[in-house]
Amino acid sequence: MLNDGPRAERLLSLTGLTADELRAGLGDPALLGAVLDFLCAHEPDLVAAAEALNVTPAQLAAARESLTK
């Protein structure tokens, strides 16, 4: 996500995180959930992220759901 300038700017702006804080928190389920919420809230972002990760958008949404259980 941080490789896509406009998407990265929007994510960092909405969360108040820096790129370094985001990278450092990737093992934090709450942070991962927030990023997945961000992606799931805007279909073009969700689709682009899924393509970049070689997964389906549904798999990303399911990953978000699994963090809330």
Image (cartoon, grey):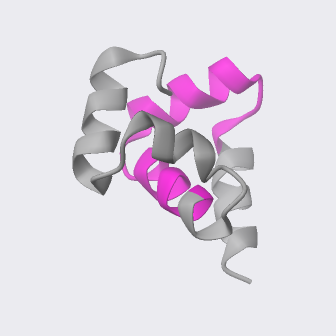
Above or below residue 69? Residue 7 is above
Q: Does residue 51 appear to the left or right of 41 in the view shown?
A: right
Depth order, front residue of 24/32: 24
**Residue sitting at the far bottom:** 69
Residue 22 location in percent, x, y? 50, 45
Q: Does residue 23 appear to the left or right of 59 in the view shown?
A: left
Instruction: Write the residue at 64% across / 30% down.
Output: 50
Instruction: Write the residue at 74% across / 47% down.
Output: 59
- For residue 27, which quarter of the picture? bottom right
Residue 15 location in percent, x, y? 31, 55
In magenta segment, residue 53: yes
Depth order, front residue of 38/20: 20
| Magenta-tinted stretch | 32-57
Instruction: Write the residue at 31% across / 42% down.
Output: 12
Residue 52 location in percent, x, y? 65, 19
Above or below residue 32? Residue 57 is above
Quadrant containing the C terminus is bottom right
Q: Does residue 25 appear to the left or right of 58 in the view shown?
A: left
Depth order, front residue of 35/47: 35
In magenta segment, residue 48: yes
Instruction: Write the residue at 72% across / 35% down.
Output: 56
Main secondary structure found in the magenta portion: helix
